[in-house]
């Protein structure tokens, strides 16, 4: 029995070792396929190994990537999550992909938690800083949302359709649809046919009349993302690195993308003369062309040396068909993620897809103004253009507001589908804040309709005013990074005021003003209305009697109070600290009282007959700081003040 048990266990361990060796071999085969970007084949090898218990950092990374780079973010999140649990040191890029995959699965809170880990690991990363500084990104995206109305199209296939472009009243797009049963080679990346360019006749009312574009352009490999000059005689497009049936690869065995220019002499000519652009390379990809409105600048995406992320956007000047120096679009546009698929509208807006800027998941479409050769701030287009999946290849006719984009969102006909839209509201393309406020009764919390709300700038100048509606609501449009105050007034109510700063990002500020009625605030003779109104003590600089800027804010509250209570009279009482002689201080405080009264009269329009004033010098100190007593500057300043006493 002992020998039988020994043989049994020997055979068991032998079989386990053989099995583990097989799974390691499967994983190795997956690694080889992954390096060649054959993600589907790699995935099968990895899954075989993982399902039989073999696990490693590399397997989990590559398995997650095999889904991530085919936009299956739900499964990508699953395997990145296992990597996060399995490994104690996950590289930052995989943390970011995990967060992005969770976001694409609409698990926003979980995504935020992983992004916090990303920030802890790589805080200097532009994407990490965007996340930390714009934690209300969903609010900002919602503010932009609802500016487009989607329109159904009927020309999508069961495979991939994307990259629409305008061409003489028609649409050119990229597709790997089956072509009437003709067999075409498939790509290892996703085991689907290679892409060709197709033409859609937009004058077809059914919107289904699609034909293959010119055979000079379409090859046996990929063609996609075309852009045309206005006269239709020149086009730029993307193709695999392929020349005369020579399918070229880089030193790692990867075939890259290249840009080509095709020309013809006139629109009746079908023959296109094709030329490879001079800044292509066998070692990196150059793809996805876009033209400026004047057709003098070509924009494109590339992972060339110096690229910040997986791909960046670049531009190059075209002069007499000669290309100038290549320039990166810089840090406003490019991140450590992917920036790709640029499009320049006739009103000079740059639209592009990115997973590095703050979005809803996967690739989102963003917009930036191009004004006087300067790149503006980047804004997410919001829903319904963007969603939790990949949204990209956005184009728009800025005159009609009609456009197209592609997405792999659920509910489509194929892997990627083209959607049409109409613009129904202008986009936010500069930093813009607004304030939504409410005026409420401080005792009952009920709204106060028909109250007047003033918007004041940092110098206390009234720049706008509104009357509240039935719900006590008001709204103002503001600039970013500015100081404002809002003040509400109404007969029989005491005024209310709040000072606030707007952040340096598009969004909405919420503020509530609470007002108290006269009968709710009895003010007998001898009352200092400063504490009654919540006024900060009005201070003066040492040995000075002019009204400081911070004092102006408080004096305006006195003005509003006296305008509401037109029968009240105020005695302005000014005080100094104990420094200098008693006679000098008495004179100084009298000058301060007079300066205060003059401000209320000259600036606030208060009748001088309703104001009296007197200086008390150092006779009524608020603390121990009398003559000869050592005190700090802040202690002395407590004695340099004005009071506003109700005397009638």
Image (spheres, grey):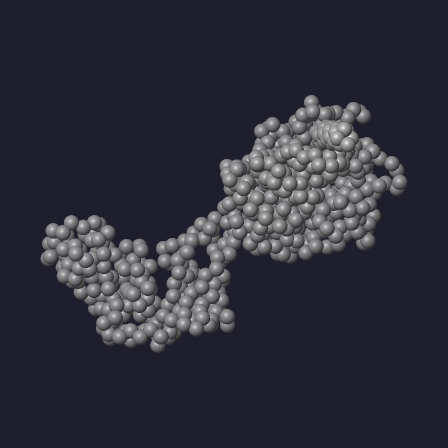
Q: Nearer the viewer, residue 559 or 536?
A: 536
Q: Nearer the viewer, residue 530 or 244?
A: 530
> How many badges with numbers are in the image?
0
Any part of residue 591 in sight: no
**Residue in the image at 87% along x and 36% along y:** 183
**Residue in the image at 22% along x and 53% along y:** 635
> Which residue, as the protein is rendered here, is positioned at the far top?
251
The quarter in which the C terminus is drawn is: bottom left
The quarter in which the N terminus is drawn is: top right
Residue 616 in percent (x, y) is at 16, 62
Placement of 612 over or under 10, stated as above or below: below
Residue 613 in percent (x, y) is at 20, 66
Q: Nearer the viewer, residue 101 or 342?
A: 101
**Residue in the image at 77% along x and 26% along y:** 247
> Which residue, as the protein is rendered here, is positioned at the far right?
181
Placement of 341 over or under 452, stated as above or below: above
Left or right: residue 644 compared with residue 30: left
Choose top left, top right, bottom left or bottom right for residue 149: bottom right
Any part of residue 614 in sight: yes
Residue 392 in percent (x, y) is at 67, 44
Left or right: residue 452 compared with residue 263: left
Left or right: residue 246 compared with residue 581: right
Placement of 170 over or under 308, stated as above or below: below
Residue 284 in percent (x, y) is at 66, 28
**Residue in the image at 70% along x and 54% along y:** 150
């Amino acid at each position: 029995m002992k020998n039988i048990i020994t043989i049994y266990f020997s055979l068991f361990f032998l079989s386990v070792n053989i099995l583990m060796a097989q799974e390691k071999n499967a994983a190795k085969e997956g690694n080889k396929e992954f390096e060649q970007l054959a993600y589907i084949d790699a995935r099968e090898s990895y899954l075989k190994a993982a399902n039989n218990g073999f696990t490693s950092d590399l397997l989990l990374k590559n398995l997650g990537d095999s889904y991530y780079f085919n936009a299956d973010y739900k499964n990508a999140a699953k395997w990145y999550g296992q990597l996060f649990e399995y490994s104690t040191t996950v590289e930052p890029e995989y943390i970011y992909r995990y967060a992005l995959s969770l976001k694409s699965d609409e698990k926003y809170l979980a995504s935020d938690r992983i992004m916090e880990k990303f920030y802890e690991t790589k805080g200097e990363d532009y994407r990490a800083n965007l996340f930390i500084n714009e934690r209300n990104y969903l609010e900002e995206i919602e503010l932009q949302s609802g500016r487009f109305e989607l329109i159904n199209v009927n020309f999508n296939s069961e495979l991939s359709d994307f990259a629409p472009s305008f061409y003489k009243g028609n649409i050119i797009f990229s597709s790997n649809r089956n072509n009437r049963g003709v067999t075409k080679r498939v790509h290892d990346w996703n085991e689907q046919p290679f892409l060709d360019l197709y033409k859609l006749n937009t004058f077809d009312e059914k919107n289904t009349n699609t034909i293959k574009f010119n055979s000079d352009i379409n090859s046996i490999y990929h063609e996609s993302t075309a852009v045309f000059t206005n006269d239709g005689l020149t086009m730029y497009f993307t193709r695999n690195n392929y020349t005369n049936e020579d399918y070229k690869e880089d030193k790692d065995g990867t075939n890259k993308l290249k840009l080509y220019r095709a020309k013809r002499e006139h629109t009746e000519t079908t023959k296109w003369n094709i030329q490879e652009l001079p800044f292509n390379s066998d070692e990196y990809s150059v793809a996805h062309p876009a033209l400026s409105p004047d057709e003098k600048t070509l924009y494109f995406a590339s992972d060339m040396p110096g690229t910040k992320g997986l791909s960046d956007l670049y531009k190059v000047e075209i002069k007499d068909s000669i290309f100038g120096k290549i320039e990166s679009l810089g840090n406003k546009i490019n991140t450590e993620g992917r920036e790709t698929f640029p499009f320049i509208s006739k009103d000079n807006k740059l639209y592009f897809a990115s997973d590095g800027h703050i979005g809803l998941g996967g690739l989102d479409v963003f917009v930036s103004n191009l004004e006087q050769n300067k790149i503006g701030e980047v804004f997410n287009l919001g829903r319904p253009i963007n969603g939790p999946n990949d949204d990209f290849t956005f184009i728009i006719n800025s005159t009609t507001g009609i456009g197209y984009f592609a997405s792999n969102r659920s509910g489509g006909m194929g892997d990627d589908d083209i959607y049409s839209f109409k613009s129904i509201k202008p986009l936010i393309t500069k930093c813009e804040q607004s304030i939504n406020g409410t005026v409420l009764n401080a005792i009952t919390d009920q709204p106060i309709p028909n109250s007047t709300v003033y918007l004041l700038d940092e110098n206390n100048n009234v720049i706008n005013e509104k009357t509240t509606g039935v719900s006590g609501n008001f709204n103002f449009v503001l600039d970013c990074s500015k100081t404002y105050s809002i003040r509400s007034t109404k007969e029989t109510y005491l005024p209310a005021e709040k000072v606030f700063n707007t952040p340096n990002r598009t969004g909405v500020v919420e503020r509530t003003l609470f007002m108290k009625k006269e009968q709710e605030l009895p003010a007998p003779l001898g009352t200092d209305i400063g504490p009654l109104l919540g006024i900060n003590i009005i201070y003066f600089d040492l040995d000075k009697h002019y009204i400081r800027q911070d004092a102006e804010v408080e004096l305006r509250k006195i003005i509003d109070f006296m305008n509401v209570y037109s029968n009240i009279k105020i005695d302005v009482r000014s005080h100094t600290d104990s420094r200098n002689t008693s006679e000098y201080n008495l004179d100084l405080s009298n000058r301060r009282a007079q300066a205060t009264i003059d401000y209320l009269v000259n600036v606030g329009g208060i009748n001088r007959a309703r104001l009296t004033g007197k200086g008390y010098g150092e006779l009524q100190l608020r603390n121990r700081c009398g003559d000869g007593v050592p005190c700090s500057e802040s202690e002395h300043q407590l004695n340099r003040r004005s009071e506003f006493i109700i005397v009638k």
